[in-house]
Amino acid sequence: MSIDIEIGTSLSNEDAAHFAAKTEAITSAMQRVRERHAAYSWVWTDEIRCRGCNASIDIPLLASTNASADKAFQAHQSAQLDALLAAGGSRGPESSTGPS
């Protein structure tokens, strides 16, 4: 993901440095989430399981399609990113969200 915004002229050096640090933290956290929660497996017609943390993710039975599973898994990854950022984004690979 790349953010291409001309902000240098409208931000002070301190604000630009803060923005760059936040952007780096989010990018790093996103990379860690994608590494730790990279894929899922179907368990049953209404359930998938994250291969990274072994979390069970329900899929509506009548909407049990790959598209629905992909959407549910993306929501799982997003929740993991939110949790990582809420914790300060400082948790490394030894995170306690499940096995590596």
Image (cartoon, helix red, strand yellow):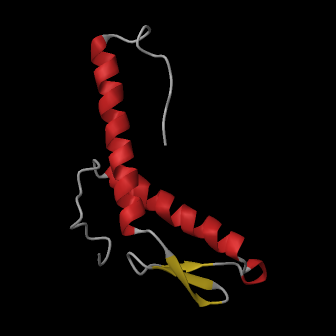
State left or right for residue 74 relative to residue 12.
right
Quadrant location of the C terminus? bottom left
Residue 98: % across, % down: 31, 76
- Residue at screen point 21% across, 67% down: 94
Residue 40 in the image: above or below residue 38: below
Q: Quadrant of residue 80?
A: bottom left
Residue 86: % across, % down: 34, 50
Residue 9: % across, % down: 42, 8
Residue 3 in the image: above or below residue 61: above
Say which of 61 and 48 sits in front: 48
State left or right for residue 23 relative to residue 89.
right
- Residue at screen point 37% across, 64% down: 35
Q: Residue furthest top?
A: 9
Residue 41 in the image: above or below residue 91: below
Q: Quadrant of residue 95?
A: bottom left
- Residue at screen point 39% across, 12% down: 11
Residue 10: % across, % down: 44, 9
